Image: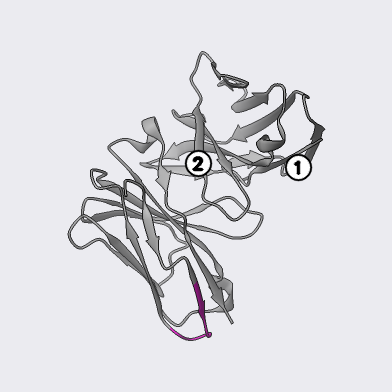
């Protein structure tokens, strides 16, 4: 598989529970991004890794959110104490080198529903 | 003011029509521009980059106007399969891309 892979595709959770999503980027891509998209809106930037280093975080990423990329390959995004407002599509993207030149490749996303 | 703004539409056009979307961006120092296409409940996919001199890919033409800080996408001879949301994307700052809210296009038979 040469694309960006995200797991799970769908997640339904009760308010207050913790959830974790996984992203496997394209193997040679050193940059990995997490975005969140709600219905009718464009994707909003959450955080960005270059290899294992988390280089940028949006102010949208509250204390309940944490992301890791421990070995510079796959990444996880954890949301603690989920709230209904966390319901969204969580998109992972990767790029080789300068995304500002080549753009990103997105995964299919994880759709989170908090009930 | 949003960093990247688009008219949400929807634009309803008949097959074969020509349709154009504009997008404005706030940071005059932005260097990279793209159009992405997103089908319903799917991930965004890169449609085309936008170069300073303008560029064309088949029925699609993208243009950049730095003085007025907008980019445009022109679709000629619209097909039913062009129905989607078109996202304007700008490298506003740093190493990440900023997305507009998208413009929805519906092509009718």
Q: Which residues are magenta?
A: A11-17
Q: Dot 1 lies on which element?
A: loop
Q: Is residue A113 above or below residue A70?
A: below
Q: Is residue A13 magenta?
A: yes
Residue drawn at point x = 81 percent, y = 33 percent: B13
Q: CA distance from mark 1 to mark 2?
A: 19 Å
Q: Residue at x 43, y 64 (%)?
A: A61
Residue B75 x, y percent position in the rendering: 67, 25
**Horizontal and vertical percent position of residue A3:** 36, 47
Residue underneath mark 2: B45
- Disc 1: which residue: B9
Residue A29 falls left or right of residue B35: left
Residue with the most extreme left position = A71
Residue A28 position in % (x across, y down): 23, 43
Q: SS for tag 2? A: strand
Disc number for residue A29: none
Compared with residue B56, is residue B24 higher up or lower down, i.e. above or below? below
Q: Earlier in the sequence, mark 1 or mark 2?
A: 1
């Amino acid at each position: 598989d040469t694309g960006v892979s995200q797991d799970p595709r769908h997640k339904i959770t009760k308010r207050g529970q913790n959830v974790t999503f996984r992203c496997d980027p394209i193997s040679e891509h050193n940059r990995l991004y997490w975005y969140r998209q709600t219905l009718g809106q464009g994707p909003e930037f959450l955080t960005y890794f270059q290899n294992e280093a988390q280089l940028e975080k949006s102010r949208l990423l509250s204390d309940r959110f944490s992301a890791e990329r421990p070995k510079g390959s796959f990444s996880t995004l954890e949301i603690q104490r989920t709230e209904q407002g966390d319901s969204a599509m969580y998109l992972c993207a990767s790029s080789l080198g300068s995304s500002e030149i080549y753009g990103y490749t997105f995964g299919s996303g994880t759709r989170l529903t908090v009930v | 003011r949003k960093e990247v703004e688009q008219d949400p539409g929807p634009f309803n056009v008949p097959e074969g029509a020509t349709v154009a979307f504009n997008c404005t961006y706030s940071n005059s120092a932005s260097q990279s521009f793209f159009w992405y296409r997103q089908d319903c409940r799917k991930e965004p996919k890169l449609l085309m980059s936008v170069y300073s001199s303008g560029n064309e890919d088949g029925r699609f033409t993208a243009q950049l106007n730095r003085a007025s800080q907008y980019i445009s996408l022109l679709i000629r001879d619209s097909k039913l399969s062009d129905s989607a949301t078109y996202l304007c994307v700008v490298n506003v700052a740093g190493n990440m891309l900023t997305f507009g809210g998208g413009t929805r296009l519906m092509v009718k038979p």
